[in-house]
Image (cartoon, rainbow, N blue to C red):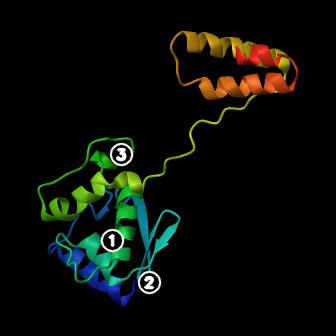
Amino acid sequence: MRVGKITHQYLSEYAAKQNVDKTFGIYENTIDKQDYIGNTPIDIRDNNLVIGEREYEGIPGLWELIISKKPDNHIYTVDDFENYTQIQVDTSALKQNNNPIEAVPKSSRGWKWAKILSNIWTNRRNYEGQGIGPTVVIPADPHTLADRLELLLASKAAGNTGVMNELVSVCDKLLRQKVISKKLYKN
């Protein structure tokens, strides 16, 4: 592997195991012998760090945050910190066992957790994808729509409050198809 001068400096510190972070930073997976951050394999291209489909510019500030147990805040910038935060969130490096569905942090008593990572953990929702929710396809067939309407009304009557959007969509479609009247729609 060819690495750039900056990466070489930080990986040398990592190899010497002097004040390096192997809990939230880079570690070697014992099964496939690849380097990882969290649950994601990494690759190094010159000075840059490739994680998944994204390539991060390998500047001293980012490497300082990834490798050091006590990153020097005179070395990293706000942009470096933003990239580091995104890496921590995207790779689930802050979660127990690097498991993305875990709700418990992989906290430690170390300086890095106390001063940097606990804040990232607290604010991680700003970096996590929210998704667009479930997609509901409304059928065009009036008989299927009527059946779905009956099911949704029964669900609402049973106390399910999460069906209103679909219920309105089905009623709108039935109204547009002139299967129900405006009076029935309002009821």
Residue 81: x %, y % from top left: 33, 71
Residue 168: x %, y % from top left: 68, 26
Rounded to the nearest whole Å, what is the CA distance between mark 2 and mark 1? 21 Å
- Secondary structure category for the residue under label 2: loop
Label 3 sits on what residue type? Asn
Rounded to the nearest whole Å, what is the CA distance between mark 3 and mark 1? 22 Å
173 left or right of 125 in image: right
Q: Give the residue displayed 77% in from the left and 13% down from the top.
A: 184
Is 75 situated above or below 28? Answer: below
* Circle 1 residue: 81
- In this rendered view, identify the residue nearer to me: 159 or 107: 159
Label 2 sits on what residue type? Asp
First in residue order: circle 3 vs circle 1: 1
- Tell me where residue 49 sits by quadrant: bottom left
Q: Give the residue displayed 22% in from the left and 83% down from the top.
A: 74
45 left or right of 157 in image: left
First in residue order: circle 2 vs circle 3: 2
* Circle 2 residue: 46
Is 2 situated above or below 181? Answer: below
- In this rendered view, identify the residue nearer to me: 19 or 177: 177
- Secondary structure category for the residue under label 1: helix
- Which quadrant of the figure contains the N terminus? bottom left
* Disc 1 crowd, CA 10 A, few/some/many (<14, 14-19, 20+): some
Label 1 sits on what residue type? Phe
- Which quadrant of the figure contains the C terminus? top right
Q: Give the residue displayed 81% in from the left and 22% down from the top.
A: 174
* Circle 3 residue: 99
- Tell me where residue 164 sits by quadrant: top right
Rounded to the nearest whole Å, what is the CA distance between mark 2 and mark 3? 29 Å
Residue ranking furthest to the bottom: 5
Residue 68: x %, y % from top left: 21, 73
